[in-house]
Amino acid sequence: MRRLIVIAALATGIVIGATAPVGAAPGGGAGQYTVPMVCDGQTVTLTIASGRWSAAYVVETDSKFIPKGTYVAVTDVETGELLFEEFDAKPSVTRAGSTCVDAWEDEGVLITFEVYGKLK
């Protein structure tokens, strides 16, 4: 359940928060979250600053992930029925580029969170 809260806060920070600078610096600054995700097939640790569309620092590669869009889906594990989905993106953005994904089961549903963007 804690994981769900962290990812919900992460999604809220990317989608709703105030605009923040593009550079995300490593460290324990206020409003930062550190989460493991699979980016382009590789498991990495992202440190994400609070703020709308804030960049994430990729710990393992010392690079930045610049988010351009998010996708959230909730699927019933037993039936495979899609219960909820939402895609949000900066204007004129498609799902091209790099993709970071996290997925987990919670109380009979599969929650999938994807972030689309550019690695720099």
Image: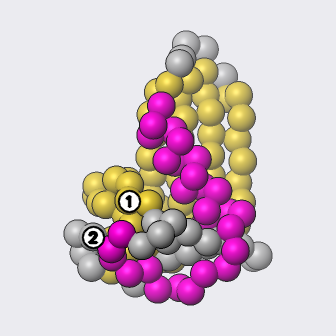
Along the viewing direction, whichever of 52 and 105 lies nearer the viewer:
52
Residue that badge 1 annotates: 34
Residue type at numbered disc 1: Thr
For residue 28, above or below residue 83: below
- Segment colored magenta: 1-28
Q: Is residue 26 visible?
A: yes
Residue 43: % across, % down: 28, 55
Which residue sits furthest top?
Answer: 78
Find the residue positioned furthest to the right: 91
How packed mark 2 is, by other alpha carbons closer than 10 Å (few <14, some 14-19, many 20 or more), is: some
Residue type marked 2: Val
Dot 1 lies on which element?
strand
Which residue corresponds to mark 2? Answer: 59
Give the SS element for disc 2: loop
Q: State yes or no: residue 23 in magenta.
A: yes
Residues at circles 1 and 2 in contact by the CB criterion of under 8 Å: yes
Residue at 61% x, 72% y: name it.
Answer: 51
Q: What is the x, y in percent for residue 7?
A: 52, 48
Quadrant position of the C terminus in the picture = bottom left
